[in-house]
Every structure is written in C-alpha cells, then in structure tokens.
Amino acid sequence: MSIVHSDGLGQFQQVNATPHASRVATKWLQEHSSVFHWPPKSPEMNIIEDIRDALLHAVEKRSPPPRTPMDLLTALQDSWCEFTSGYLQTPVESMPRRFVSLLRARGGPTRY
C-alpha cells in the first residue's frame, strides 16, 4: 500500500471473503490500514478485480516470461507503469453504473 499510496490515503477493499476475514488478516488490517467495507453480496463492485486481471494478462504477454519471484515483481511493476491513467480511470468511472446495478439487484449479483 505504501508503494501505491505513499501519501497514506489508500484504503484496502474488504469484500468479506473468508481469507480476508481471518483473525490474522483482520488484525493486520486494523493495525495497518483503513478498510473500506463493501456490501457482502456484491463482489462485482470490486474494480480491483478488473485491474488485477488486466495486470496479470499484461505480465503473461511478456517475453521472456518471469521465472523467479524477483522477475515476477519486476514484470508486475513494469506492467503497472505501462498502464495509462486513462485506462485506470475507466473502471473508476464505471462505479456509478455499478452502484445502480447493485441497487436494482438489491445487493445480489449484477452483470459486472
């Protein structure tokens, strides 16, 4: 988080998944971060999933592929830096439509 939000304004997104709700994870989040809680039935609201998928796809396309953990870290950082601000803005701008879909679905699954 300190790499992405060195200003200290970043928040982790809690989607109530079992690994996120473990005692260890909950304690760490309470001690190290502010957490933005999402409605429990709306994982589709998590734009991080879209960005993560794009980042992983970008890494998979790299040649040669990363072979060590350090290679992977470098590939992830390089791929992240190659994203344009416009690309990252698109999922953010989709949030009003996602919220409308979520409200219409009463917290259930949406097309996102």
Image (cartoon, rainbow, N blue to C red):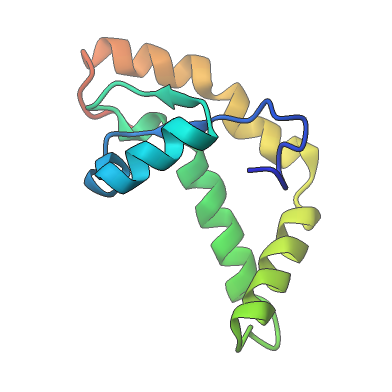
Query: Eyeballing the image, is 10 above or below 101?
Result: below
The answer to whether one can see residue 37 in this image is yes
Q: Residue 2, percent across and down? A: 69, 43
Q: Quadrant of the C terminus?
A: top left
Q: Quadrant of the N terminus?
A: top right
Q: Quadrant of residue 80?
A: bottom right
Q: Quadrant of residue 102?
A: top left
Query: Eyeballing the image, is 64 above or below 112?
Result: below
65 left or right, relative to 74 = left
Q: Residue 62, percent across and down? A: 68, 78
31 left or right, relative to 111 = right
Query: Eyeballing the image, is 45 above or below 21?
Result: above
Q: Residue 32, percent across and down? A: 53, 36
- Residue at x-position 68% and y-position 25%: 9
Depth order, front residue of 9/42: 9
- Residue at x-position 32% and y-position 47%: 24
Q: Quadrant of residue 14?
A: top left
